[in-house]
Amino acid sequence: MDDLAGFLRTRRSRVDPAAAGIPADSRRRVEGLRREEVAHLSGVSVDYYVRLEQGRATQPSEQVLDALARVLGLDETERGHLYRLARQRRRRAKAPGGRLRPELLRVLDLVTDAPALIMDHRLDVLAGNRLAGLLYGRPIPGLNTARHIFLDEAERGLYSDWETCTLDVVGHLRLAAGKYPDDPRLASLIGELAMGSERFRRLWARADVRARTHGRKAYLHPLVGLLELHQENFALPDEPGMELLVLSAVPGSRAADGLRLLASLGADSGDAHPAVNAQVRD
C-alpha cells in the first residue's frame, strides 16, 4: 500500500533547491531536487539513491536514512514514517484485531459531558458513548470516519472544517499503511475511498503523513449549531492502533451549552446508548 520509493519521490519534489543551497537554474525541468542532487547532499552514490527510488535497494542504514531525512527536510512524523517504510522488508507488523476489553467500555460510560470514542488505525469507531452517537446523529456500529468524511456527501456539512479534516484523514491513513502494509481491510478501505472520491485520490498521491493528536475540531450540528471542541487523543496501553478520543468544550462556552442542549434533546427523544461496534474481549 505504501513504499519507500514512492515516499522519497514525493518528498524530493517538494524541496526548494534554493533552500538546499543549489543556485537557480532556468533550465530546470523538475520540481524540487534532482536525484543526483539528493544523492550528493546526502553523501550517497547517485546509483544507490536511484536504486532506492526504484525500489531495488533494500535495508538502507540508519546513517543513510538520517541523511535523507535531513536533506528532504522531514518533520518528526515524516521521519518516523521513512524509517518504518525502510524496515518493512525486515519486520512487518501484524494488524490489530479490534477487540475491546470490558473495562474500556466502562471508561466510556464514565465520560458523560463530552463525546468520547474508541477508534482503530482504520478509523473504524469501535465504541462510543451516548453523546458521540448524538453528535454524529447515527448509530456508532458501522461508522468509519474516513468513509463518513469522503463518501457520505449528505453528512459533509457536519464537519465545519471539512477540507482540513480530509487532510488529517489521508495523512493518518498513510501512516497506518506504513505501519500495517499487510492489513487487507485497510487496503480495501483505501481502494474504496480512491474509487469513490476524487479529492481522496489527489491527496493520497501527495503521500503526506500526519500524526493524529490533539487539536481543535469544529462541527456544525443540524440541531445545536456550531460546536468548537478540543480533541484529545489517548493511546490505549496494550491495544496497538487503538485510541480513546475525547471531544471537550471550554466550560461556560457556547460549545459547552450546545453539548448540554444536544444531551437534553437526545434524552427527550428517548435515544438509547449507542451500541458497541467491536468484539469485547473477555
Image (tube, grey):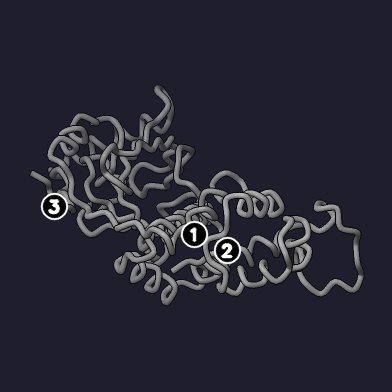
Helix, strand or loop at label 2? It is: helix
> Of the numbered discs in the image, which one, if any, rests on residue 7?
2
Q: Is residue 237 above or below residue 52?
A: above
Residue visible at 18% across and 45% down? 100
Nearer to us of marks 3 and 2 is 2
Check disc 3 and give the amino acid type: Gln
Q: Name the residue under label 1.
A: 85
Q: Which of 37 and 239 is in front in this view?
A: 37
Chain-order first, disc 2 or disc 1: 2
Helix, strand or loop at label 3? It is: strand
Residue visible at 15% across and 49% down? 275
Q: Where is residue 164 in the image (x, y as percent from the top left)?
A: 53, 52
Residue at the extreme bottom:
195
In contact (CB < 8 Å): disc 2 and disc 1: yes
> Of the numbered discs in the image, which one, if any, rests on residue 279?
3
Chain-order first, disc 3 or disc 2: 2
The residues bearing labels 3 and 2 have C-alpha atoms spaced at a distance of 35 Å
User: For residue 153, what is the image quadrant?
Assistant: bottom left
Q: Position of residue 160 (x, y in %)?
A: 48, 49
Chain-order first, disc 1 or disc 3: 1
> Of the numbered discs in the image, which one, if any, rests on residue 45?
none
Q: In which quarter of the image is the N terminus?
A: bottom left
The residues bearing labels 1 and 3 have C-alpha atoms spaced at a distance of 30 Å
Q: Quadrant of the C terminus?
A: top left
Residue visible at 52% across and 61% down? 59
Q: Is residue 230 above or below residue 22?
A: above
Check disc 2 and give the amino acid type: Phe
